[in-house]
Amino acid sequence: MILALLLDLANIAGGFLLAAGLLRRLPRVGEDLGRFAERAAPYGWVVGIVALAVGCAYLLTHLLAGPRVFHFEIVGIGVGVALLWERLTGRQRPAPSGTEAPTGAALLLAVFGIIAILVGLQGLFTPD
């Protein structure tokens, strides 16, 4: 139960960090969310490790013991890989430059971040 909560919170926090480029464009709250995301970004690797580890643990558990693979762990693994991309490959993760709207790969990561937030919220309200 604690691991499920960790996975859901990692999906929400990681999704927020990935979607920060889109969330900055929101009227009235975008600047505040952007500042918070900039302060939280240096700790994104911790969220990535938690999401990747717990997502892989649940994936192995559900592959070997059943009942089936759930989307929560797939999204968690994706969030973990996306947040740890710089540390895994040594290349920069695509990000929007300055105040411009994200395009291309940065937009894809931002949309995946929104999906991760929604999946994390769904996981909080789904019984184990």
Image (cartoon, helix red, strand yellow):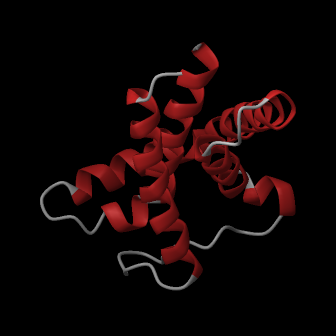
Relative placement, left or right, of 36 versus 123 is left
In this rendering, the answer to whether 24 lies above or below 98 is above
Measured as percent of width and height from the top left, residue 64 is found at: 87, 32
Q: In which quarter of the image is the C terminus?
A: top right
* Residue pictured at 56% horizontal, 36% vertical: 10
Q: Position of residue 16 (x, y in %)?
A: 44, 49
Q: In which quarter of the image is residue 99?
A: bottom left
Left or right side of 65 for 23: left
Residue at the extreme front of the image, as rendered: 67
Find the residue positioned furthest to the top: 1
Q: At x 55% / y 67%, what residue is drawn?
A: 109
Q: Residue at x 44, y 78 (%)?
A: 102
The reply, left or right, for residue 30 in relation to residue 94 is left
Q: Camera-side residue: 104 or 11?
A: 11
Closer-to-camera residue (51/123) = 123
Residue 47, percent across and down?
A: 62, 37
